[in-house]
Structure formats: C-alpha cells, structure tokens
Amino acid sequence: MGFSAGLARGGFKPVVAVYSTFLQRGYDQMIHDICLQDLPVVFCLDRAGLVGEDGPTHHGVFDIAYLRHMPNLIFMAPSTPDELKDMLEFALRQNGPVAIRYPKGSTSIPPSFTQPTQLGKAEVLKEGKDLALISIGSMSEIALEAAHILSKKKIGSMVVNARFIKPLDKDILERICKDVKRIVIIEEGVLDGGFGSAVLEFIERENLKGVRVKRIGLPDRFIEHGKRNELFLKYNLTPQAICDVIMNEVMK
C-alpha cells in the first residue's frame, strides 16, 4: 500500500491486486497514504463476497462497509468479466483512488453493458413497475433470475445493476423512489454499513417519502466454511429465497 502511494506520487498509476479480506490490513494506509492525498491508485479486490471452502478468514464480505466512507474514493463492482475489464480501463483514466470488487468465480449472464463505464451511472437490466431489484456486482445474475420467477406471479420487477457503490447513481434512485416505491437491495456483503445502507442514507438525505426498502445480504457474524452454493442457500441469497422474502415481506 505504501509502495503504491510512492509510485503514484512519482507519476505512475499503480494497480494493487489483493484479496478483499487482506485489504483490511491496509486500512490505515488506504486512508492516510492514498485517499487523503487523492492519489491515482487502483485497487482490484479479488474474492469479494463468499469464497466457499477457504473459510471465515477469507470471505471478503466487509470491504463495502469499510471502504465506502473514505473521501475521494471511487468504488465499483462489475456484474460480468467483460464489465470488469471495462471498469479497469475506466479506473486507469481517473486521477484519484479507485477500488473494484469482484467475486471468486464467474457468471453465466452475457455481457450486458452497451456503453463504456460512466462515473456514478448504473445500468437498467430490466424494466418493471411493481418493484425494483437493485443489485451490486455479483448479485445481478441472481436478481435477474429472481425477476424471472416473480414474473410468473405477475409481478413486474425492474432490475438495476448498480455498478457504483460510490458515487451512487442519484438519477436512477430518484426515479425508482418516485415511480416504483418498493425497493429490494441485494448484495454479497454484510448488511451493516453495506451498499443497502448507502441507499437508505441517500433516501433519508434527499428526504424521499413513501419508499419501502428491503435489504438482503449477509448477517452480522463471521461466515463459516462451506461451499459457495451452500452458503448462498443458507443465507437466503438464492433467487427462490429472495422471491420468498419479497412475497412475504415486500408485496404484502
């Protein structure tokens, strides 16, 4: 971390590739050596989210909560490998610190973005009027599958790939709060201080009334060893589990 700050001060644009969970050890350097000086260092946070058999020490579930409050930082999460490549190119064009979080494994959804990454701009993957599923990064595939299940129940779901944890897409959030009113936020990270918290803070800050928000993510505990698909099932992050929560808590 300190070395990358020195390189950036010397005119380079270093890329720091690190497991999400191990960046926790560089928290102080992230604030004082990089963000405080607004240096153009790019952080690629591998294994963000649940990593399966590597166990409690390796789950990268805290990075959203401990990074999104840092001034000067741009923070992104791609939904596909191609989007990750585009975000990396975008990050290298910036003149300040940028972090990109991405999960272990890949995705089965095709490349969805039609325009290059733009600062603070989300992507609407599907339109719908009954509720909005706002997903961040790896959860976009899950959100699309959940929307398909809900469509069989005659529920039209708008699906948004948020792309940016910081800054948020204010325009799309204002549109959703005005026109849809029901919001379900899905993230592969801890709920306390996570992406959903950022959206709630935005709604409060903008004094947007009459909006129902349900956050779906990981609880305030250390996640145990287990296969990735088993952990998704246990913590209600599968498409069917998300639909069950929506039918029981959001659509009533």
Image (cartoon, helix red, strand yellow):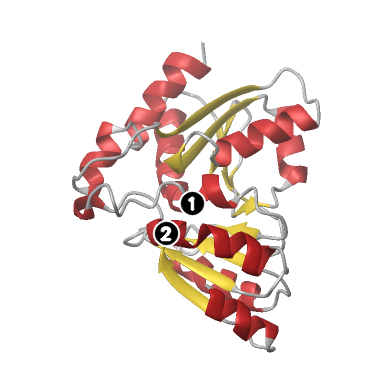
Q: What is the distance, in whole Å, between disc 2 and disc 1 at their CAs?
A: 6 Å
Label 2 Cα neighbours within 10 Å, binned few <14 / some 14-19 / many ≥20: many
Which tag, 2 or 1, sits closer to the chain's start? Answer: 2
Q: Residue furthest top?
A: 252
Q: Give the residue number, with chain letter if any, for mark 2.
A: 20
Asked whether residue 13 is in view, the answer is no
Q: Is residue 133 above or below residue 85?
A: above
Across and down, in percent, residue 88 comes to 56, 73
Asked whether residue 92 is in view, the answer is yes
- Badge 1 crowding class, 10 Å Cα cut-off, few under 14, some 14 to 19, many 20 or more, is many
Against 134, residue 25 (above or below) is: below
> Quarter of the image holding residue 103?
bottom left
Residue lying at the far right of the rendered structure = 206
Task: Where is residue 16? Give x, y as percent.
Answer: 50, 75
In this rendering, is residue 155 above or below 95? above
- Residue at the (49%, 53%) spot, across then down: 137
Residue at 47% of width from left, 48% of height from top? 140
Three-letter code for the amino acid on which mark 1 is drawn? Asp
Mark 2–mark 1 CB contact (< 8 Å): yes
Q: Which mark is residue 63?
A: 1
- Front residue of 132 and 84: 84
Tell me residue 5's x, y (percent). Answer: 61, 77
For the image, the number of numbered tags is: 2
Camera-side residue of 1 and 114: 1
- Callout 1: helix, strand or loop? helix
At a point 23% along the width and 41% down the height, the residue shown is 224
Q: Which mark is residue 15?
A: none
Is 39 left, or right, of 86 in this rendering? right
Label 2 is placed on what type of residue? Ser
Q: Which residue is drawn at 78% across and 31% down?
A: 205
Residue 158, given in percent of the width and then of the height, sits at 58, 37
